[in-house]
Image (tube, grey):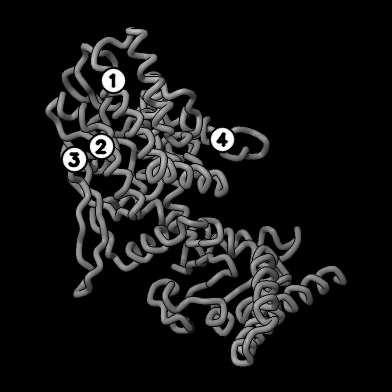
Amino acid sequence: MTFDPFPTETTYEAAGITREDRDSIPFIPDEIAVHILQDAIKWVEIYSATIFQARSIASNIYIRSYSNSKERKALSKAIRHSKLPAVPGCGKYSMRDICRLERQLYSACFIVIAGLVGMRVSEVLSLQLGCVERHKLGDTSQSQAYIRAMLFKTSANATGTMQTWIAPEPVVAAVAVLEQLSGNLRQAAQCRELFLVKYRVDSPPIGITTNRITVWMDDFIEVSAPPLHEGRRWDFSTHQFRKTFARFIARQDRAQLLGLAEHFKHASVAMTAKGYIGSDFDLLALVDAERRAETAVALDAMLSNGALGGKLGDRIRSGNFAFRGRAGDQIRRDYLDFVLRETDLTVHSCEYGWCVFQTETSRCDGDVAPNPVNRSPSVCLSCSNFVVEERHRAYWTARRERNVALAEGAPRLTQAVLTDVIAQCDTVLASLNRSAEGLDNG
């Protein structure tokens, strides 16, 4: 057709399908997301060197035809004598193995960028040579990296708009790997794209499509072997990494992020402080939606739970009788709907408790959210915004055991500090225990 029959409607609207009719894209469960992201980072930062070394050896030997048996034997011998480190899923570093490893490396780079920046698949695949830039942080010698790509979905321009996203160091490393990985193909195609593929010897390199990177990503995930979810293999899609990124930012729960904590904390602070460069407002809206969903979950847990600790937890526990149990379900739902609809209340998570943030009572001097620089277990325990519930018990138990072990044989001054920390843990655990006993007796 030479004209748009539905110029004012989206495809779904034209088909009579509303947002409520469609299944929302799920986020990747925490343990699976962390496994995949950390494995992808390992491919980028560790395995890539081996893959490039194997490719270099192959290029030096495989000057003529792929089908020459002498060349294949020479390649195998050269690889064997080079004693290359093992790469997961790799056999004898045949030419077929090397090609497959390159596809795995493309997938790892995609996952690192999509998972740690929150870009859409179209935006990641549009990356070009020199897309990383650095901005100085004030008058300091430090700088923050940003990644530039084409924003398509919400752009008024049909060809997209160049925008910028915060990029942590693993993403900078992934871009560097992509530049090396696609170098020969870029030279052959006389282009600047980083995601390129060549299907036949006599065909020109072309851009990697969404469908192609999805297939390669599935192969990568099969080799990575993440944990099962409820006894089944998780069904991945490219957009899930964006949704998961938004959820991690909204939650700010460092206990679930392991080695990825610093990036998400940084990105969250930058976005909250409006230091986020670019116009990906859809991502910011997605983060806000996830934050509100997390707030609803947290408030529901607080109102229905009698086992709470912390200053605010003690106050909530003493007045939430009407919200507990089956009789309080509807009252609790109505109250949550009111709070989410009529207020801007937000609940921020960390591994040791909830912060029902209010600026005027914040002990960490937060403005619109808890200040990550000043936030700590000791500060939060003295704050009127703080709540601890049963799910946080493991943190306080482990903290107590760790400090008890350190206190043995420590100097007197150090013991005094550790004893204070142990007392804090005892206070929290005693509060949870008393609350739980009260529920049992009731």
- Please tell me in which quadrant of the rendered image residue 296 appears: bottom right
At a point 64% along the width and 76% down the height, the residue shown is 313
Disc marking residue 61: 1
Lower sequence index among marks 4 and 2: 2
Observer-nearest residue: 52 or 403?
Answer: 52
| Residue type, numbered disc 4 | Ala
Give left or right: position of 261 versus 423: left
Q: Are marks 4 and 3 in contact (CB under 8 Å)?
A: no
| Residue type, numbered disc 3 | Leu
Give the CA distance from mark 1 to mark 4: 33 Å
Vertical order, 353 against 22 (above or below) = below
To which residue does mark 2 refer? Answer: 180
Q: Are marks 3 and 1 in contact (CB under 8 Å)?
A: no
* Circle 1 SS class: helix
Judge the density around disc 4: few (<14), some (14-19), many (≥20) Cα neighbours within 10 Å: few
Judge the density around disc 1: few (<14), some (14-19), many (≥20) Cα neighbours within 10 Å: some
- The N terminus, quarter of image: top left
Closer to viewer: mark 1 or mark 4 = 1
To which residue does mark 3 refer? Answer: 129
Judge the density around disc 3: few (<14), some (14-19), many (≥20) Cα neighbours within 10 Å: some
At a point 31% along the width and 11% down the height, the residue shown is 66
Lower sequence index among marks 1 and 4: 1
To which residue does mark 4 refer? Answer: 225
